[in-house]
Image (cartoon, helix red, strand yellow):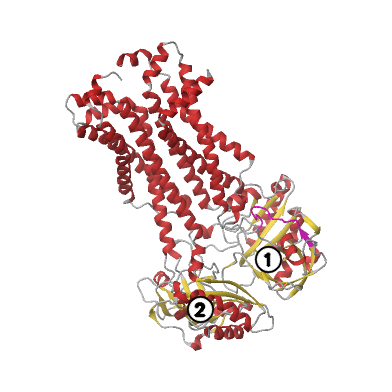
Amino acid sequence: MFGYYFALALRSLKRSKVLTALMILAIGLGIGASMTMITVLHVMSGDPLPGRSAQLFVPQLDARPLVRNKSSKDSAPNGNLTWPDAMNLLRAHRADRQAAMASGSAPIRPLQGSLRPFFQPGHYVTADFFPMFDVPFRAGGGWTAQEDEQRARVIVLNAELNRKLFGDAPGIGRTVRLKNTDFRVIGVLDDWYPQPTFYAQVNDRAFGKTDQFFLPLQTALDLQLSFGGNFMCWGNGGDARTSDHCNWLQFWVQLDSPAKAQDYRRFLGDYWREQQAHGRFPRPVDAQLYGLMDWLTRQQVIPSDLRLQLWLALGFLGVCMLNIVGLLLAKFLRRGSEVSVRRALGAQRRDIFLQFGIESAVIGIAGGVLGLGIAELGLLSVRQRPDGYAQLAQMDAAMLLGTFALAVCASVLAGLLPAWRACHIAPALQLKTQ
Amino acid sequence: MPLRPLLSSLTRHKLTVLLLVLQVGLTCAIVCNVVFMIVNRTAQLRQPSGLDEDQLVMIESIGLDENENPLTRHAGDLAALRQIPGVTSAVAIDALPFNGNDWSNGIATTPNAETNLTATAYNGTPGELGTLGLHLVEGRDFRPDEYLPMDSAHDWAGINHVPVTIITRALAEQLFPGRSALGKDIYPGDNPVRVVGVVDHLLRPQLREAASNEYSTLLPLLPDSADVTYVLHTKPQERERVLRQVSDVLDRLNGNRILRKPQTFTQLRDDYFRRNRTMIGLLLAAATGLLFVTALGIAGLASFWVQQRRRSIGIRRAIGATRGDILRYVQAENFLIVSGGIVPGMLLAYALNLLLMTHYELPRLPFLYLPAGAVLLWLLGQGAVLGPALRAAAVPPVVATRAD
């Protein structure tokens, strides 16, 4: 029976070839566009540190004064801390691990070979950064808190910069000159680029390859290396990096259990009130502690343009679906006489339902296959974009299955209503009107 | 055309008509908003920066020599750059519209006041106004004796000593509404700075909300950090040639530096708006796709109905209806369905716009878009239904005598 209905469906579809082709094209376009954007957003909202992210938190102490721009962009806290607050939290040592950090860039001056000096982005961090984020070392390791305080001139290279400077072998113990200062290489990373670069300020460069070197924060401040990112000051009294009215540092803590997170929240609250008693923190908000994934959502790590593109694609799919339902309905109802004859000859309602259901499923599956192709093309075009997330736009097995399931579900759902209406055609009435 | 038979025929296809009405409504709502977004983003793309955009080239230079005085280095570099044939003038600056290097300060009009207004400070060597091509609408340019170093080594303390400033008209109107800003004092740092000039346009290095995009101040502060951008003014057709020479000239003078991003201002602007252009392309594709699918739905449905009604059309023809009557009937039917979709579509368009306003900082949809969207969909409907309508009109009366 199944094979027969299938043959009937093909015959019926062949009768109006152009329309069938256009219906398949419409559903293919809708599914292709939606799956492209769902895939892009899926890979971008992934966990940058699986297994560790649940224990990582951002403490937020919004030290800014009351009067600020009314606009939403400027008033939302970006999590940056002032130097004194970051150092207080660091030295309080109340979390399992904690680190302060800031982004920067520096001219690298190769000491050997004919390479010209070149700029590289990097991060200035404190000792716990490496164990806290489980940073994979190919060779060597990070530095100690003591070296932080001593402003040690040590550096950890990411694999790419190491390759550029020293070839394939890790350059442990060798010297790199940044700006005018020599640093000793003590560690080489294993191509470490968590996606997004969650530990930095969330901006439009959150995705893609970024940091090529890591060195102690205090050393960078001492040497006046160039810092990147948002540096915001208020009030009078100069714009020094170490002042208590300029925020620019990111701070992360590792808290291994919910109880410890609770304790840390309390500690932050106490710190907040103590500082308020000294006349700081004029805002009527409290200290906050955000989990990593929660933090990324709050900071809108996914650009709003991409979310808009997803909604656009889904809206398009919706209109395509309405279109298919309407066309199939009109098509099936036109064959009222055929249905009447079959019903009069003894076919049951579910036979009719099955027959038309199969016809719509054929369109759906064809549209799904086409949609898969279009989604691959869509992702190919996303990969051509100059943005950092471009290279992430790949379809994995789950997404592939998802696309197909979406296509079949969509079209079967679209076919359900017309098929259900068709199987309710009364046999006698239709025969009589002819 | 009598409405009754039209309506009663449509009520026989309630569900199908409802689906088509929904589709038209949804298309109307989405297309109105998408077109609005396209218009908005195109306007952003076209914003005048205030500069002679097609006559500027630039290069960033980062000196690596610890012992040299940046001010001397910049002066020497500029002298050499001005010697390049075709270069009419050259200046050293710390920021440009679209280069993202935004040094903004809170601007008050009384000492020690809290303020919620920030403006970008642009700093450069003498001749900045002329080289960039800024148009002074009031007041004067800086005098040579008003220039002093930025003092970037000490947290840019120069801003606390600078005597005068030139501001944009947008900032002047915001700070001193209804009055001339000339001669007034503003407080970007600790001390008063006198406004001596007003320029008509100067965008900030990074665009924000439309209202504050032109809040800029020009200060007679000489860039004195190792990292500086040289901007050269030349003829549009000479830009590429000048750009090819710039790196060589600077390298020959002193090789101990990194030269970055040699480019024309046009390239800088194009790069800044690249994402915006991608988005405009996608929005256009989405609008076209939606209209295509809806036209397809209308045409498909009409052609099914024409096939289904061949016999009744034949009967109508046999008892005296002309081809024109049949044509107009099908067209009127389509007009009715599309109109049925446009009414909820407009409400939906408005609702969608409210949603976009809260989540994507889109302005309110101007009223004019709604009737324009309606006309567009009516035209689309009539265009799509024309083929099936002509086929219906061509049905010969003799069909009435045949069994289907």
- On whether residue A101 falls in the magenta region, the answer is no
Q: Is residue B186 visible?
A: no
Q: Position of residue B95 (x, y in %)?
A: 53, 73
Q: Chain of mark 2?
A: B
Q: Mark 2 = which residue?
A: B232
Which x, y percent locates residue A257? Answer: 74, 45
The span picked out in magenta is A187-199
Q: Residue at x 16, y 27 (%)?
A: B320
Image-based side of A14 in relation to A40, left or right: left
Give the structural element (helix, strand or loop) at label 2: strand
Residue appearing at x 67%, y 66% in the figure: A120
Label 1 packing within 10 angstroms: few (<14), some (14-19), many (20+): some
Circle 2 packing at 10 Å, graded few (<14), some (14-19), many (20+), is: many
- Residue A222 appears in which quarter of the rendering? bottom right
- Which amino acid type corresponds to the residue marked 2 in the rendered image? Leu
Q: Which residue is mark 1?
A: A84
